[in-house]
Image (cartoon, rainbow, N blue to C red):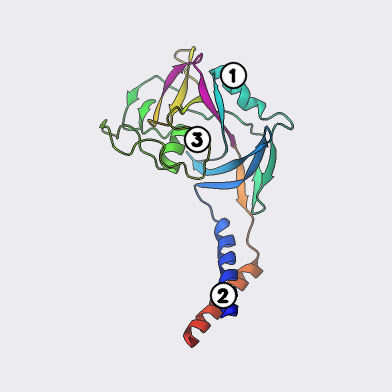
Amino acid sequence: MKKLTLIYMILFLVLTLAAATASANLVTIGTANYLGSDYNLIWDDDNNGNSVIWLDYSNGATNWVAQNAWAAGLNASGVLTYDIDSTYTVDWGTNSWRLPATVDGPRVFGYDGTTTAGYNITSSEMGHLYYTELGNLGYHDTAGNTQPGFGLNNTGVFNNLRNNDGRYWSGTDFTAYSSSAWHFFMYYGSQDTYLKTNNLYGLAIRSGDVSAVPVPAAIWLLGSGLIAIVGIRRKKG
């Protein structure tokens, strides 16, 4: 009985390791130490076709210029120190930490996700995170009706996203009116423009290629052997 229990435990560990190498929408791949505390690095493997990494930290509310400066400042030597999980490798390339991007254009408000402002918009990096990766609902559905269960109810592997007051600056200018920039409101799932002088929160994001470290063939063979042993034990039982 003890041997069988041990086999099950080893089998569980093997399968867990194998699962960790599989791609998923949002995966914690390690931590970054910032101001003396560790914050998760979250890999978003397909945000509008791009591989990006989020820093799970909400910077205090400030104006658009200062928020962009904060994100850019994360790239300075020694500001962030990384501890990447051994099951992943990260190629940061030449990319830098920044605020999330939004598709700029004339401000057109709507509900069906095809406009630049409004609800159910997934073309921006924060909108894609909110609706597609996390599966949250906007205050209005695609027909413009209010819907129950809206809001940042699912935060996935994030610990520090703000909900009720979660207005976050995008790093994208509103070119039609230079005094404004795009932002996303996590409580309503809404996207719009806002005067740059307003104080909103900041999220940092960075493009990067993440690869899972392959599970050694010996581990796969061990797992296969354990599965066979468990099967034989069950038949004998």
Residue 5 is tagged as: 2
- Quadrant containing the N terminus in the rendered view: bottom right
Q: Residue at x 61, y 50 (%)?
A: 211
Residue 185 lies, in percent from the top left, at 43, 28
What is the crowding at mark 1: few (fewer than 14 residues within 10 Å), some, or many (at least 20)? some
Q: Nearer the viewer, mark 2 or mark 3?
A: 2
Residue 141: quarter of image: top left
Residue 197 lies, in percent from the top left, at 51, 13
User: Can the viewer see residue 126 in this picture?
Assistant: yes
Report the front residue among 30 and 214: 30
Furthest residue to the front?
2
Asked which secondary structure carries label 2, the reply is helix
Report the front residue among 111 and 167: 167
Q: Amino acid at mark 1?
A: Ala
Predominant secondary structure, magenta span: strand
Position of residue 86 in the picture relative to residue 132 (left or right) = right
Marks 1/3: CA–CA distance: 19 Å
Instruction: Give, as a single range, the part of the protein colored magenta.
Output: 192-206
Q: Amino acid at mark 3?
A: Leu
Earlier-in-chain disc, 1 versus 2: 2
Q: Is residue 68 above or below residue 127?
A: above
Residue 161 is tagged as: 3
Say if the magenta span includes residue 33: no
Asked which secondary structure carries label 1, the reply is helix
Earlier-in-chain disc, 1 versus 3: 1
Residue behind mark 1: 66
Report the front residue among 157 and 119: 157
